[in-house]
Amino acid sequence: MADRIASVRAALAARGSLSLDAIEPRVAASAVHLGLTARLTAPVLGAAVLGCPLDVRPAGLWWQEVTSGPVPLSAPAPEPGARADGPGPAPGDWDRVLFDEVLAPVTAAIARLVPVSGRVLWGNVASAVNAAARQVARERPDLAGNAAQAAGRLFDNAALRGERNPPGPAFLRSSCCLFYRLAPGSPNLSATCGDCVLRARTAR
């Protein structure tokens, strides 16, 4: 994880023609965390919407190291009989497994390596959950309701209950991922993400 944060920090510096010192380690760490949590959450939520629990726990997960873009993942095929009859909530405690055995350890590992606020990191998770549900709804409008239900189930986890806004198209997270720190000067709309809390502040 430390190597990945370092490589992303170097890539961000090169992309902006900046010195390495100009990229704060916590910004690179947040970028790595957001990318990993999004990559892990999206397939699990998508499978849950189809009524099929997907296991992305580290013991059975394979991934390829890449500097940019989605991390290639390979997860075990679901156990026979795990799939429900048609689209709907996945059976079992898929949401607890995702949080307790995947997202929480990843989040804790990042926080140990680089001093990043837990509020920022769990805000990244909230953003990843909402983005996954929106992607399902965009590609399969007929499953939008199930996607919203799955996202709501994840938002009910104690780690995300501090979010002021529910998941949905108008979702704004209650923290910032720190990407605005990559742009010089004061925060502005062009330097913030679409669901960033700073957008509400700068739009006033």
Image (tube, rainbow, N blue to C red):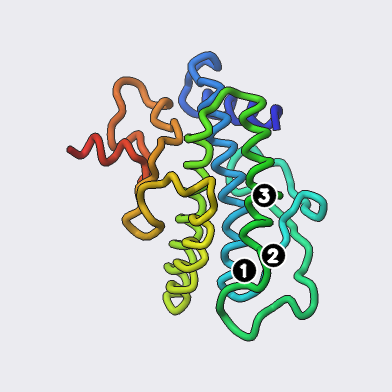
Q: Earlier in the sequence, mark 1 or mark 2?
A: 1
- In-image side of 181 versus 79 (left or right): left
Tag 3: amino acid: Asp
Residue 70 versus residue 52: which sits nearer the camera?
Answer: 52
Tag 1: amino acid: Ala
Tag 2: amino acid: Leu
Q: Answer few, some or many: residues within 10 Å of disc 2's Cα (few below 14, many 20 plus, some between 14 and 19).
A: many
The picture places residue 180, in percent across and down from the top left corner, at: 39, 30
Q: Element type at marker 3?
A: helix
Of badges 3 and 1, nearer the viewer stands: 3
User: Which residue has dot 3 on it?
Assistant: 100
Q: Answer few, some or many: residues within 10 Å of disc 3's Cα (few below 14, many 20 plus, some between 14 and 19).
A: few
Q: Earlier in the sequence, mark 3 or mark 1?
A: 1
User: Which residue has dot 1 on it?
Assistant: 47
Q: Element type at marker 1?
A: helix
Residue 20 placement: quadrant: top right
Query: What residue do we see at 28% from left, 37% from top?
Result: 189
Query: What residue do we see at 69% from left, 41% from top?
Result: 105
Residue 44 versus residue 139: which sits nearer the camera?
Answer: 44
Q: Element type at marker 2?
A: loop
Q: What is the number of the mark on residue 54?
A: 2
- Residue placed farthest to the left in the image? 204
Q: CA distance from mark 3 to mark 1?
A: 18 Å
